[in-house]
Structure formats: C-alpha cells, structure tokens
Image: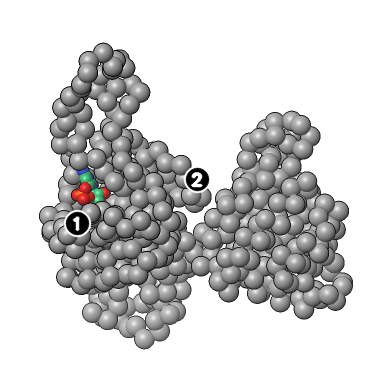
Amino acid sequence: MLTNKTIVLGITGGIAAYKAADIASKLTQAGARVEVIMTESATKFIIPLTLRNITGRAVVTDMFELASEFSVEHVALADAADVVAIAPATANTIASLAAGIADDMLGCIVLATRAPIVVAPSMDVNMFENPITQENLSKLKARGFTIVDPAYGRMASGKVGLGRLAETETIIGTIKQMLGRNGDLAGKRITVTAGGTQEPIDPVRHIGNRSSGKMGYAVAEAARDRGAAVSLITTPTCLPEPVGVEVIHVQTVSEMREAVIKATARADALIMAAAVADYKPKSVAKAKIKKDSPSLTLELVRTPDILAEVKGNFIKVGFAAESEDTIDNARRKLQEKQLDLIVANDITSPDSGFGVDTNKVTLIDRDGKVESLPLLTKREVADKILDRVVEFLAKKPPLQRIEFSLWPPSSTERYKRINIPEDVRHLFPEDKVPFLIETDIGTFSVCVKRHENTPSHIHLRRTNWFKAHPELKAGDKVAIEVIEPMKKYRLKVGI
Ligand code: C5P
C-alpha cells in the first residue's frame, strides 16, 4: 500500500533522530518515495548523507539551497505529499508548529500541505510532561494532526519515563492508517478474531492449538489500511498489537464468544480467523494437578460454535483449516454456519497455515464461486478476503428503506434539507442527536432538526449534497436506507 506514495519525513533535532534512518529505510523498502526534510539541529545528530543514501532522494536541509527539485518550491513538496510525518518531533518543533511558525522548510510544508500530518514526539520526560508541551500537542490534535504517543522507557539522560520515540512499526502503522483513511472500507466496522483459544485445565495448564494469530492480525491491519474501524479480538500471541485498531484480549472460547457478540452488534463484517477450541475440560482443577497416578483422563465437553451462533446484518467470513477433503469440508461449514465466505486451507502443506507468513487458500462463497489462490503472504490473502467483503457489502440489503418526495423549496432558498414526514420520524434519532448519512459524495454527520413552523428535517447545507444534485426538483423521489438503526443511514435519489 506504500508503493508510489510520497511520504515527507521531517526529522528534527533530538537524540532519537538516528531512528528516523530506520523509518526512512523501511518506508523506502516498502515502495514509498520518501522525501526527507531535516531541521538544522537534526543535521547535528545525523548527517543528511545517511538519509540521502537510504532514500535515494536529495535531502532538504535549507529553505534556500538548490540541491533538491523541491527546495525552493516548498509548495510543490507540500502538494506532492500523501502524508507528512515528523519523527522525531522535538518540544521546540511541536511548539513552533502549534504556533504556525514557518521559519524553516518543515514549518512551511506543514502549513502548506493538505495531506494528513503525523507527529511522533520524542524528548526528555519532564519536557514532555510540561503543561506547555501538552497544551501544544492538544492544539495540534484539535487541528487534526495525528500524534503518535511516545513510549515509556529509558532516556538518553538516564531518566526513565514517557518520552522515547514510538517504535518504527507504530509510526509506520500510523502512516499506513492515514494513507488508507478514504479506502474502500472507510466508514465500515470490521470485527476480526485471531489466535488460538486456551481452555484451562488447572491454574498452570491449558488446552491450546498451533495458531500463531498471524492470519487474523494480517486481516486486521489490511482492513485498517483500507479505512475500516477494526476491532481485533485476540487470544495471547507473540505478535505486536497493531496500531490504530481496537484490540480486545481474550483467552477462552466463552470470553471470545462474549466479545464477538458485543463487537458484532455494530459490525458490518465478522472475519473469524481464530482457531477456536471445539472441546474444553468439563471442570477446571482448582489446584495444580499432581503427577501421582500413572495415567490421567480429562473429560472434555463441546464448546459453543461462535460463528454458527452469531447472527445479524453483517457479512460472515469463516476459516476452515483442514487436513483432508479441504474443499468439501469447507463447503459443508459454509452451509452449516450460514457464511457469506469461507477461506479453506490445507494445513498439511509446510508453507501454508500455522505459524508461517504465507498461506495457500481457496475462497468459497455463498453463491458457489470457488477461487483457488496461489501461495501468497498472509497480508495478500487478507486483501483478497477483504476484496470479497467489499463486494458483499455493496450487495448487502438495507434493514429498512424509507421513500418520500422532496418538498418544494421555500421562496427564499434552494433545497438545503430533506423533510421527514411525521409518520416515519420515529425511525430517526431524537432531535439534534448526530447520526451518519452515506451519500454519493461522502459520509456526513447530520441530525434531525425542527424549528417553529417547520417540519422535522435533515439539514444538508454543509454537506453540499444538494449542490452536487442540481437536477433535483420538487416532487422528486429520494430514499433513505437504514443501515444501522439510529446510527447510520444511506441517502439515494432517482428511485
Ligand atoms: O473448527 P471449524 O473448522 O468448524 O472452524 C471453522 C470456523 O468456525 C472458523 O472460522 C472458526 O473461527 C469458527 N469456529 C467458531 N467456534 C467454534 C469453532 C470454530 O467460531 N467453536
């Protein structure tokens, strides 16, 4: 997803400046065009040549030098940026950005760009906790900057506290999230499960399985990078928590079941990549079981089938890890669990399935379409699954459809609102309670209003929706579809 993207990487003068080389390197390796801008003090900590060699691009250090194609025309670089990321950002840079100061190239670009801006602070703990710095960061947040909070740990000064530059993966994860914010899953909520459940036997032992969680984490990250709001329900794994994703930790099947029911109440899709135990010990020993007897029998009972059980107006995707008759077994599970899509993989192959970074799967959908994919990385498989989820979401029928005619505009104004007849008023939230409305020009937060002598209406003036539809006239039909009652609706014309 970073291929052909332009990332302007601002480096400022702190001891963590050397870590920017790693960020620049990983972004470049992932296919991004990285344009580095260094403040003068940053060049005291790390030399521009390092960044130039890593990125293969001229590094801008001075507003007035002519070394780079962008060095004079700072606006060109501000326009070219898909994301501007400042890592590390010193207290001084944060203060000057908060004040809108443009006395160096970085300041100019931040003011001139329309791209999302990511700021990763790094400084001494006392400087970070100083109310002035905190106030400056709040100002930036209020202006829509994305702050990657510093990590806790040892500082160059020897003190321990909050102020270390966030990990490279966290900063790059945030950049990816920004790049994908208008992707094909924007405005959608996706619930993903990952890892293998653990059913306790006694206080120290459990029944587990070989799932590493890699497939589920890849799906969660891919959905995030396509703009979705992701809830990742995960068992304990060795994987780092993906940034920009709501992570819910569970251990047993019953904890996972509870979390899935809660998350899917508002989800557009559930992707159940977790390996869920089919059986658990009938009872859990209170004390550690001793090895006194030559053999031990555990009585196991069935666990609930989460995927078969959860129902709702969301797309259901399951996995079938099989060691024989892969396709037939997957087809049966698709039917039994009433899925939209099942991802079948033969786990006997060494480069596919548990623990590895690759997977060879077959996608079978509710319409009978079978798609066998070649060996791919788990991230590539994740994107293939999400391509299908996007297709299914587009076909998903609304819960309810309310049709009505446009009222004529008042004598002084053109259309700015949609009047809601009183007999369907109860299908919308209370007056002034915001809800989302998806339209052909974007998704907007609106609310129902009613003034004296006016019917209940949704004001669309700020959304410019009526401007985008100059063809509309009195009596034309529009429809509002309920996607999620009281929260999300879709506006359609020409029915
Ligand atoms: O174990 P099985 O092959 O039936 O798993 C198929 C799908 O069902 C997987 O997506 C898995 O996450 C889900 N499953 C579940 N609850 C279970 C067992 C499996 O949700 N108890």
Q: Which label is found at residue 324?
A: 1
Residue 493 location (% of width, % of height): 30, 78
Q: Is residue 392 above or below residue 224?
A: below
Residue 378 location (% of width, % of height): 40, 59
Can you tell which quarter of the image residue 115 is in? bottom right
**Secondary structure of residue under mark 1:** loop
Q: Is 216 situated left or right of 298 in this image?
A: right
Q: Which label is found at residue 293?
A: none
**Considering depth in this image, is 470 or 179 the residue closer to the camera?**
179
Query: What is the three-letter code of the residue carrying label 2?
Result: Pro
Q: Residue at x 46, y 42 (%)?
A: 238
User: Count the marks: how many?
Assistant: 2
**Secondary structure of residue under mark 2:** loop
**Badge 1 or badge 2: first in the primary sequence:** 2
**Considering depth in this image, is 375 or 180 the residue closer to the camera?**
375
Can you tell which quarter of the image residue 103 is in? bottom right
Q: Is residue 68 above or below residue 436?
A: below
**Considering depth in this image, is 361 or 219 the residue closer to the camera?**
361
Residue 230 location (% of width, % of height): 40, 53
Q: Residue at x 28, y 55 (%)?
A: 348
Q: Residue at x 42, y 62 (%)?
A: 377
Residue under label 2: 240
Separation of marks 1 and 2 at Cα, in angstroms: 32 Å
Location of the C terminus (image quadrant) = bottom left
Residue 273 location (% of width, % of height): 31, 52
Q: Residue at x 33, y 26 (%)?
A: 205
Q: Is residue 272 above or below residue 387?
A: above
Circle nearer the viewer, 1 or 2: 1
Query: What is the three-letter code of the residue carrying label 1?
Result: Glu
